[in-house]
Image: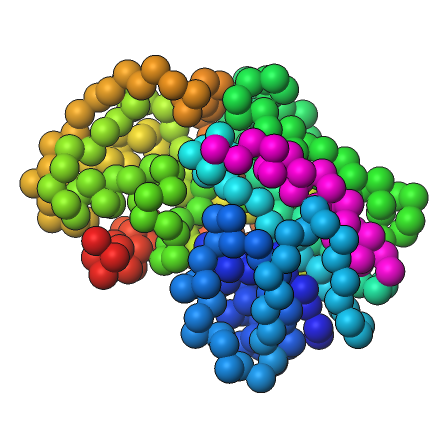
Amino acid sequence: MRILITGAAGFVGSHLSDRFLAEGHEVIGMDNLITGSMNNIAHLFGHKRFSFVKHNVYHYIYVDGPLDAVLHFASPASPNDYLEHPIPTLKVGSIGTMNTLGLAKAKGARYLLASTSEVYGDPQINPQPETYWGHVNPIGPRGVYDEAKRFAEAMTLAYHRYHGVDTRIVRIFNTYGPRMRLHDGRVVPNFIYQALTGQPLTVYMDGKQTRSFQYVSDLVEGIHRLLHSDEVLPVNIGNPAEMTILEFAEAVVELTNSQSEIVFVQPDDERITDDPKVRQPDITKARQILGWEPQVTLSDGLAQTIAYFRDKV
C-alpha cells in the first residue's frame, strides 16, 4: 500500500508510520510541525519507502501518484496546544478534514479519521459507548478541539454517504508512550517529569476525576485493525481500566521510585473549564468487530514511558 499520514511527526502519527513501514508499505508523512517534531521521525529519513512533506493540511494538498489510504491525524491534541492555537485547531479539523477527504476521493483511497473521546465532552453516562451523542460546551475554551472533531466526524460520514468514499473513524481515548512531548501539558508527561525531577506532583482539584490510559502500541494495533475492517461508523479504541487521577499519580511515584509528594491545586484557568469528570471507553464494539482489546498493562507501559523520559529530563 501507499499511505499518506497527516500529523506524521506527532506522537501517534510517528508510531503509525513505523508500523506501516515495518509491514512493507510506502508512507508519505505530512506535518506542519506546529506541535509535531522531526525528532519523532528522524530515524525514518533515509528509509527508501518513507518520504516527508512539510505542509499545512488546511491548504490545498497535492500528492503525486496513487494512494491506497489517507490517515488524517493532524491536529493539536493537548489542552495547552489547542488553547494556544485555537483557530488552527478548528481549521485542521474542518478545512483539513475536507481537504484530506477530497484527496482520498480523488485517489480512490480508503480514509481513516483520528477522532477523540473528547467528542463525548463531560459525559453524563459512564462508560461511553459509540452511540452516546456527548455533552459538549460548543463555546467553551475546549470547544475548539471538541467541536472540530465532531465536525470532522460529520464531514467524514457525509463524504462516505454522498461521495462513496470508503471511510473509517477511530475515537481515541487517553494514550501515552514514548515520543510524547515532555511539556505538552497532559497528565502523563506532567507527572513523570515532576516525579523524575523531584518536584511535587500537582493534582488538580481533589484528584477524583477519572481517566483510562492505553499504551501507544495498543492504539496502533486497534487503528490497524480498524483500517482493514469494514466498519464505517466510529469505534472506540481505549483501555477500559478506569482510575482516578490521584491513583495514577501514586502509580507514577511508585514506578519512578520518586520521593516527590502529591499536592492538590485549584487552578483558575481555561485548562480545567469543562474538564471531563469521568472518562472510560466502552470497547464492546472493538472487541466484537475487530477482535481487539488492550494488551499492555499500566505498569509495563509506564515503565517504558518513564525510561524514555529519563533521557529527556
The answer to which of 289 and 113 lies nearer the viewer is: 113
Residue shown at the point (24%, 45%) measured from the top left: 192
Quadrant in the picture for the N terminus: bottom right
Whether residue 277 appears in this view of the structure is no
Visible residue check, residue 185? yes
Tell me the residue at 16%/48% (across/down): 196
Q: Which x, y percent locates residue 164?
A: 90, 51
x then y, percent, for residue 188? 33, 42
Say which residue appears at 43% left-offset and 21% top-offset.
Answer: 270
Q: Which residue does the image show at 91% across and 49% down from the upper left? A: 163
Residue 8 in which image quadrant: bottom right
- On the picture, is 286 further left or further right than 296? right
Residue 61's place in the image compared with 157, above or below, is below
- Report the front residue among 178 and 212: 178
Q: Position of residue 178 (x, y in %)?
A: 36, 58
Figure check: 286 above or below 146: below
On the rendered structure, is 265 left or right of 139?
A: left
| Predominant SS of the magenta segment | helix
The quarter of the displayed image where residue 271 is located: top left
Is residue 202 shown in magenta? no
Q: Which residues are magenta?
A: 84-106
For this orientation, the residue located farthest to the right is 162
